[in-house]
Amino acid sequence: MKKNSYILAINYLGHDTSAAISYNSRIIAACEEERYNKDKHTRKFPINAINDCLKIVGIKINDLEAIAFCDRPQFAISEMYLKPALDDKKKLDFIDRDKEKIKNFLNVEYQIRKETKFNGNIKFYSHHLCHLAGSYYSSGFKDSLLFSIDGLGDNVSNHVGNGVNYEINLLHKGSKFPNSLGLFYSAITDYLGWRHHCDEGIIMALASYGNPYQKISSKSKDSYLDIMREIIKNKKDFDIVINPDYTSYQYEKDTWVSKKFLKIFGPRRKYNHKITSNHINISSALQKRLEEIVFMQLKKAKKLTGQKKLCLTGGVALNCSMNGKILQSKIFDEIFVQPASGDNGTAIGGCYLASKDLKKFKPIKDWDSYKGSDFNDEQIKKVLKNKKCLFTKPKNLYKEVAKQLANGKIVSWFQGKAEFGPRALGNRSILAKPFPISMKDYINKNVKFRENFRPLAPAILKEKSKYYFKLNQEETPHMLQAIKVKTICYKETPAIIHEDGTARVQTVSKKMNMKFWKLIKEFEKITGCPVLINTSFNVKGQPIVNSPVDAINCFLSTKIDCLCIGSFIVKKNTNEK
């Protein structure tokens, strides 16, 4: 073993903490701390993720050549706290309230060494540069336009880069706090009664039901979109400007919108209170304005660079509705969205950047998201026996599970390495047939315990995808673009169609995920349909399951009919139903 071939990257000091390990610039392990401590979007130091990465790779901490840290703490303190406080005395309150956070920033290297016992080189990298690198160097593109858009990192909310011959040239180093598309989207998420930095996808789903052009009231001349255009503006080429008259998060921690905003749109909705047309139209106008700004910037950047390919990343890049419109606009020939576009994915970029610095970088192609924990049949069987589960080992696993699905059963599917990122891509999934249309409501209510307007995604055999969806590129294997469906879907797969006539498509190939491909193929043999509903193996508010124990606990707490885990099929005792 060559000590100087391995790099560990750590994402910490924000949400979605994570770790990844590369060997000669190839990512060979990546894990999210929330999967272990069960605190969704956790901010805790990712010691469990680090330890599991080391276990997956089969090395010890001091076999590493270096640790890459995906932030610059000293820079962040200066930009987020000291400089703003000098300009505005109101910002002194942020320093007082964030004492513990600032202490963590100052002591981060000490904490890394204390937690990991690592005694080697620790390198620090810009948050958004890690985002850009994580997308660019995973894409397989030699040349590409690079876009990072999120809430905040290093006190800025976006970066624009030009990737040429595997080198990143920055064109824009970011719009400073509080000017952030991601933060304002979080502000509206909170205003509408959901959890900021967690439930933004709910707002995106709700947006399809609204009308952004609707007048706010009979007395108003302004539409919802008119006000959103007054709030969110684009300055020069890539500067985002949020009108401070409508927000309060720049002055007070844990507050979001201003009195002026509340005067126009009404009081903040409380969770579980009725969702009104006002709430729906606000979400629709927000989504529309987000797309307007991003399209404006992408067109300017393409004109400036001449690039025909796009790498997109940052938390805002998880907005599959926006991504689908970018893909179908044909502005770019090819688009790659990093599957772990949130802050968890900065660990991927950290590995790449350190590899380049240490002259170990080699371009890669064919990125896959299966980088996490894996369990063999012996380990699984031991857990099943300890849990006193009823299980069998069928001769033909795929055929047996496909029969269950064809008969309308809900199946949880636990196979191979855990996915890295927020999407279940056929290794930690809940599966069902995509018909009848009532299947969506049943799963949302009885399995996921979530809002009935939220869509469920289709997983389809790659070779059949263009018969069902209006795809502009060969595949969308990471479920990150909402694609317009074709007429056949309304007849054969109605449960996967969202209100706007789109679906968040995952194309499944033999090369990417053979086991999942075989299962869908068996389902097609029985039903004639090459599509399955694929939703993440978790319930609302919980991380995706990671271990066999997690899988069994989730299975038993829902109306999932059977669990396929490794080579085994688990069914419920009568008294567990």
Image (cartoon, rainbow, N blue to C red):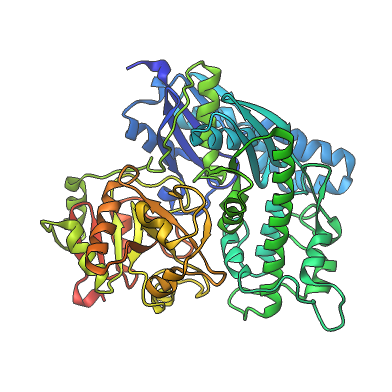
Vertical relation: 256 (above or below) 31: below
Which residue is outermost to the left?
395
Is residue 348 at least partly visible in the picture? yes
Q: How many marks?
A: 0
Left or right of 525: which side holds 419? Answer: right
In-front residue for pair 459/333: 333
Specify whether 323 is left or right of 157.
left
Residue placed most toward the observer, 386 or 28: 28
Q: Please provide percent x and percent y for residue 553.
A: 31, 62
Residue 332 in percent (x, y) is at 61, 44
Instruction: Give above or below for 375 relative to 123.
Output: below
149 vs 543, nearest the viewer: 149
- The answer to whether residue 425 shows anywhere in this view is no
Residue under the point 83% across and 73% down: 263
What quarter of the picture does the N terminus occupy? top left
* Quadrant housing the C terminus: bottom left
- State which quadrant residue 85 falls in: top right
Q: Is residue 337 above or below residue 325?
A: above
Whole-percent x, y for residue 548 in the image: 28, 53
Q: In screen coordinates, is 569 left or right of 186?
A: left
* Residue 289, picture quadrant: bottom right
Q: Position of residue 441 (x, y in %)?
A: 44, 77
Foreground residue among 310 and 573: 310
User: Residue 58, relative to residue 374: is it above or below?
Assistant: above
Seen at 68% across and 56% down, the residue is: 291
